Amino acid sequence: MYVEVRVAGKAGFCYGVKRAIEMTLAAAAEEKGPIYTLGPLIHNPRVVQDLAQKGIKEINSLDQVDGGNVIIRSHGVSPEVFRQAAGKGIKIIDATCPFVGRAQKFAREMAEKGLPVYIVGDPGHPEVQGILGWSGGKGIVIENADQISQVDHSKVGLVAQTTQPVANYQGVVEALKQQGVEVDARNTICLATGERQRAALELAKQVDVMVVVGGRESANTKKLAKICRESGTPTYHVESAAELQEEWFRGVKTAGLTAGASTPDAIIEEVKRRMKELDQMTNGEEEMKDAMEVKSPQAGELIKGVVVQVGPDEVMVDVGAKSEGVVPRKELACYEVDNPQDVVKVGDEIECMVVKAEDNEGKLILSKVRADAEKAWGSLEQAMENGTVIKGVVREVVKGGLIVDIGVRAFLPASLVDRGYVEDLSKYLNQEVEVRVIEMNKQRKKVVVSRKAVLEEQYARKRAELLAGIQEGQTVKGIVRRLTNFGAFVDLGGLDGLLHISEISWYRINHPSEVVNVGDEIEVMVLKVDRENEKISLGRKQILPNPWDNVEEKYPVGAVVKAKVVRLAPFGAFVQLEPGVEGLVHISHLADRHVAKPDEVVTEGEEIDVKVLSVDPAEKRIRLSIREVNGEARPARENRSRKPENPEPKVEAPKEDNLTLGDVFGDMFKDNK
């Protein structure tokens, strides 16, 4: 039997490292002049060597070059480096990881507000040194809560190195609050780091040996190796396949493989192939023992067995003892079980704790739930310390929240279920959820978890990735989340962009709800990206046909067309020829008689015939006429102007060239003769 090699679900290049390498290779292909990286681009000698062969040289200081192009690696640098580069005529290509850039931005904003900035991290790490520079001299680097002395400020800011364990960061927050200090805490830890650590820990528990691949100087790789060792599984940290040794895999059935954020896929594949080769050399001739000594289980002992029968009240398990073991229904899970078939099935291999070696009937009494809990507590303590995300299944809705099965019974408060308020918690029943342990007490069998913390980090990660990758002029899809009088907010997958009411359509609307509704998936164009303030402006009409493009063909001068009166002004009436195309009928063209007000002739909403007088597509103007449609006066309607109940007989006005004072005032004196 040969070893099975399993690779962790999250291993190898992270987003920031991959982005830095892509930007570096693109610069080498496009830029003129030498290309340098300020420090090793990533903590992987093989990758750095490959880049050097492509002409990309590593420098440790800008003093080593005069001009050229310098890549800022994903760890980022202080603002002083940018100022120095500008003074030396050096072009900077900034490949700072967006998550690191986010920490730098927060540090700068806090410092500008006059706050001392606490930075949780390794004081010697280049990322921390860069963040410190952005704090403008107000930064204080601490590795953990134990390093916090008496704080002399009523309010402080707090950021973290992106690869820090969440538990360490939260410990610093609590330590500051215990001193009565108001903390502007910004969780700048990269979600991918936690995911990689969680995947490595889960794999380490399932295999006989772990191999962690990555640079010796890589902080996140060293952390992965430490986490795997703490699981109790033999763990080896290597930089390449050449470092693997035969004796590591002797007698091993399963081996796990994970890699740090600076390890390319090619190196991971090389190590995997070599692991299988060494296994064939060491285990090819070994045989498994066929017989095992049968011994009597003892109370409190953990044993494995195979389910042979599932009844309504108990489950029978073959544990290789003198008699089969029995698991009562209440000992199957940490929640109430209605049907044991929902938990286990015949043929399943399960682990149980021995409750009684023999009961009154001579049966071996077992508990699956106690075995699950025993295994879970150790991993939960480690998960809480490292801030690892774990999975569980929602089993009950209780007062104030949910009960989640994570190997033990855990409480998920309603306020921590989602990023916003959840009215109906029952929709989460029997769903698998990702949570983080935020409080636990083994003696009291108390565990509190948060799903909101996981969602917030995922949201922050998507937000940073979106801001880093989105470009002006790009067409994207999003979900309408909120409508206001001035526009619609569209979720682009982690960040909301504003679709202003003037950019929704080519025609005038009074409210966004006339075109879109909350929940609609729509396509929009990115008009402007403000990465500094994390704002995105969107447009919808830009991806729709412009009705003015062929307006001269559709409405040639002299044509008589149907139109709808949409708005009245003192100088005339605006009419709509089609959605997005409006024209003006000047007051002088409403009728072939004098008109004092447009409402004497037309009303809003009325459909009329108009004649096209002129078209100016560039200025989006169309002049129209009602008067010239048929050359006849448009009669006034009774409801368009108030008239006296007994109007005076209409008297024909004399022509303008024969008008006299007597014609105007003569009737005023008739009754006084």
Image (spheres, rainbow, N blue to C red):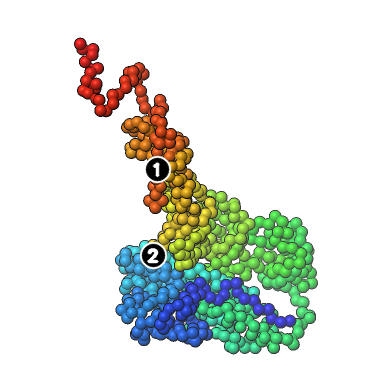
The residue drawn where x is 55% and y is 85% is 239
- In which quarter of the view is residue 236 placed? bottom right
Q: Which residue is mark 1?
A: 613
Tell me the amino acid under the disc marked 2: Glu
Residue 233 in view, yes or no: no
Quarter of the image that includes the N terminus: bottom right
Q: Residues within 10 Å of mark 1 (few under 14, many from 20)?
A: some
Q: Residue furthest top?
A: 673
**Quadrant in which residue 532 is drawn:** bottom left
- In this rendering, would 401 be left or right of 246? left
Mark 2 vs mark 1, foreground winner is 1
Q: Position of residue 487 (x, y in %)?
A: 43, 50
Quadrant of the drawing holding the C terminus: top left
At 55% from the left and 79% from the top, the residue drawn is 264
Q: Earlier in the sequence, mark 2 or mark 1?
A: 2
Q: Please, is residue 88 above or below residue 182 in the view?
A: below
Q: Position of residue 587 (x, y in %)?
A: 35, 37
Residue 132 x/y as whole percent: 36, 74
Tell me if I can see residue 303 in this picture: yes
- Secondary-structure class at tag 2: loop
Between 237 and 661, which is closer to the camera in this rendering? 661
- In this view, the residue in front, 182 or 593, is 593
Secondary element under disc 1, as helix, strand or loop, is strand
Provide the residue designation for mark 2.
Answer: 532
User: In the shown orientation, is residue 325 left or right of residue 412?
Assistant: right
